[in-house]
Every structure is written in structure tokens, then in C-alpha cells.
Amino acid sequence: MFEDTRPASLDDLGSGDALAEFRVTAPGEIRALLKQLMDDAVPLNLSASDGSAYTTMLWTVDPAAGRVSFTADMMAPAVHDIVEADECAAVAYLDRVKVQFDVTDLVVVQGHKASVLQARLPAEMFRFQRRNTFRVRTLERTAPTASFRHPGIPDMSLALRVLDVSIGGCALLQPANVPLLQPGAVIKGVRLSLDADTQIDAGLMLHHVTSTGAENGSVRLGCEIVGMGPTAQRALQVYIDQTQKRRRMMSHE
């Protein structure tokens, strides 16, 4: 329910007490969450009621004025579509928690050097714990990589490190010098080279982009693995089981 960059449907969760465990209304907690999103430069996905979406970052938080602002590329058509839409919600990930809030009174503020999207400081936010899916951290010594062509720049070949993997998804490390991939991107022709015995051909669907907090500006790409055949699935399961066993052995050395 809460894995992708689309806003969770609050109607599906019910109302009143059904949402109480997810809702944050204390002004201090809201400011703390927003500050963490801003300080860590966490990518946010703005999703509007007309279906338009735009990936941005929180630029400023002004509690006194009751406003927040987001970075904006005025050349991107989605920026203008979102401003014109009736409703908009922001989604981001802080570690294992999905953060969501409504974006209201959204306007474009143009400055001399840069333009931003400005909105009202949210009165409430929601925190959703991600699904518990068993994952294993890959072993660095096996140099696990995902090789593919950048979906937005077909001439660019990438080989990104695989940080962890489950039977249905994986996390990749993207360096800051690589043009950012956008949530929702479908990546075809991916070769997952996990170790000398495990190479899997599949596709990836990028669900979310989060900051690693590292000074080098790298980001973590959370992907769903799609298009795997039965043979590839068995090979991946064997790899997961063996990696789990190896990590247990390493912990006892």
C-alpha cells in the first residue's frame, strides 16, 4: 500500500481513529519533519489531482509566515500543471517511513536568480511504515551491479551498485554525477550481476529516490524488479538464501 511515490489513499484507511496512528498534528513535530526533509535534501514527489507529477526538494520552511517553498524548474511543463490543479500532495521517504502531506495554496514565486513553488505550511502530515519485505544486503566483495542504459539518455550506459535485494525489488546507489532518474521511470534491459554465478536479466520500475546523507550527494534508488522469468526468480532466491547464510557466518567469525 505504501511502497510507491504516489500518495496513499486516505479514504481507503478510513477516518477518525483509523488515521490517528499515522497522523502528525503537533506543530513542533511537523517542523522537525520538514526540517529533516530540507536538511537532507530528500527528493519529494508532488502528485496533482490531474495526474501530473514533479520531483522536487524542500527549499525553505518559514513557520512565522506559515509557508514552505520547493525548488522548481520553470521550463518543466509539470510545474505549471501542478499549480493549476485542484489538489496536490507531497510524498517523500525518510529511511523506512513514507511521509505524506497535502500541498495547498500552491503558487510560483519568481526571483532574480531562481524561482520556487510556494505553499502553505501543512497543518498535518502522515507517516506510513513501509511494508516488511525480506531483503539482504549484498556483499561488497562480489561487486554487485545493475547495468542498463539511462532511460532519459539512451546513449549513456550505467553500472550502479546494488545495495540490497529481495525477491521483488532492489536498491541501487546512484552517484551525484549521474543525471537523476525520476520516480515512475520504467527501465528495460537491466542486467543484475550479483556475483560470479548470478546474472539476472529483467526490468526495473523506479518507485522512490532518497538521499543517502553522504557528503558526495549520492542517492538511493528503490526499484521493483519486473519481467523476471521462473528461472531468474529461482536464481535470485538461491542468491538471497546464500547471502543470508554468508552474513550469518561472517557475524560469527
Image: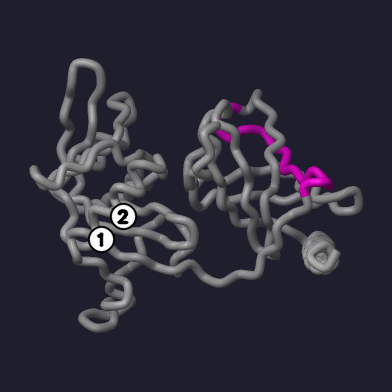
The residue at 20%/66% (across/down) is 25
The residue at 77%/47% (across/down) is 140
In this rendering, is residue 218 above or below 92? above
Q: Is residue 226 left or right of residue 18?
A: right
The residue at 83%/47% (across/down) is 142
Residue 84 percent across, percent down from the top left: 18, 41
The answer to which of 151 and 128 lies nearer the viewer is 128
Residue 87 belongs to the span the image colors magenta: no
Tell me the residue that label 1 is attached to.
Answer: 29
Residue 93 percent across, percent down from the top left: 43, 54
Query: Residue 190 sits in which quadrant?
Result: top right
Quadrant of the rendering where the N terminus is positioned: bottom left
The residue at 26%/62% (across/down) is 125
Residue 182 percent across, percent down from the top left: 48, 40
Point out the residue furthest to the top here.
112
Question: Dot 1 surroundings within 10 Å: few (below 14), some, or many (20 or more)?
Answer: few
The stretch in magenta equals 140-153
Question: Dot 2 surroundings within 10 Å: few (below 14), some, or many (20 or more)?
Answer: some
Question: The disc labelled 2 sits on which kind of residue?
Answer: Leu
Tell me the residue that label 2 is attached to.
Answer: 33
Point out the residue furthest to the left here.
65
Point out the residue furthest to the right here.
197
Question: The disc labelled 1 sits on which kind of residue?
Answer: Glu
Marks 2 and 1, how far apart at CA: 6 Å
Quadrant of the rendering where the C terminus is positioned: bottom right
Q: Is residue 245 left or right of residue 27?
A: right
Query: Residue 227 sits in which quadrant?
Result: bottom right
**Residue 251 bears which disc, if any?**
none
Element assignment for label 2: helix
Element assignment for label 1: helix
Residue 7 percent across, percent down from the top left: 35, 59
